[in-house]
Image: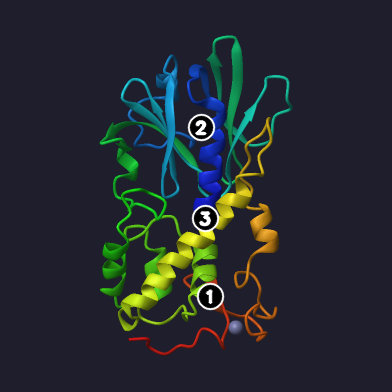
Amino acid sequence: MPELPEVETVRRGLAHFLTGYTFRSSEDLHPRVLKPASIAPLSAVEGARIKSVNRRGKFLWFELDRDLALVAHLGMSGQFLVARKDRPEPGHVRARFVLKRGLKSHELVFSDQRTFGWLSVEQLSDGVPTSALHIAVDPFDTAFDRDAVIAAMRSRKAAIKSVILNQEIVSGVGNIYADESLWRAKIHPEIAACDLSVKKIGLLVDAATQVMAEAVEVGGTSFDAMYINVNGESGFFETSLAAYGQEGEPCPRCGRPIKRIAFANRSSHFCPKCQVNTPHR
Ligand SMILES: [Zn+2]
């Protein structure tokens, strides 16, 4: 599933290729691609120019020159591909757009095998589309208030891993980056957030920011001139994971095997030696 760094990589790619382009045509190719909350069909973007491509958490949007936005969520398997017209198309295409700028033309394709992703046409309030208004800012946003986020996290009695995953407190951290940042900050995933010190939660927030920034760096180099692709297989995943998916592998810090435990229909991976389940007040 794409997490914030992958979505940021996509945003950068889309911004690089499509800013200043005007939508010339649109095709809605699947009954579920348009979110029910959309205020208009996809064809509402035709004739509109892309001013910028923005992101909050995992919500991505094209800001258009008519106070409208084309909003996208990649869900589990959504991908944007930018292709020149003569390139072969991927499978599972849910929507297709042609964009032009002067004599230059690009085709933008939204493909989504599992159909949890969606597109919608929305109005903006203070530059943010309606569907993303409830999402907290993420650590890369200039409006991110580190102290307020730490205080909000510390007020919770839930397990720290649930709290760092709560998109209304801090957005963008998914299961992979939660496990990696808890490992870096040496925090057991099941400790109650209120049992952690301000300093310890600060370490966690900084670790989450750092690990996602590193992933953006890697992901940011993975698109070529023809395709922008989110597939969760950036170099970061192959080389840099210390905890996530590493059950039984030695902890890169102490050598003890990484352990996996069940967590809300998914898994948590941690080092039983470095991440001890005792309060850090
Ligand atoms: Zn360890």
- Tell me if the residue at label 2 has its CB under 8 Å from ligand 1: no
Residue at position x 69%, y 81% in the image: 250
Residue 203: % across, % down: 42, 72
Q: How is the image coloured?
A: rainbow
> At label 1, which amino acid type do we have?
Trp
Residue at position x 66%, y 52% in the image: 234
Q: Residues within 10 Å of mark 2 (few under 14, many from 20)?
A: some
33 w.r.t. 262: above or below: above
Q: Name the disc covering residue 183, or none.
A: 1
Kindly report which numbered mark, 3 or 2, lies closer to the viewer in this rendering.
3
Observer able to see residue 52: yes
What kind of element bears circle 3?
A: helix
- Tell me if the residue at label 1 has its CB under 8 Å from ligand 1: yes
Kindly report which numbered mark, 1 or 3, lies closer to the viewer in this rendering.
3
Residue of label 3: 213
> At label 2, which amino acid type do we have?
Ala
Q: CA distance from mark 3 to mark 2?
A: 18 Å
Q: CA distance from mark 2 to mark 1?
A: 33 Å
What kind of element bears circle 2?
A: helix
Residue of label 2: 15
Residue at position x 70%, y 60% in the image: 238
Residue 181 in the figure: left or right of residue 168: right
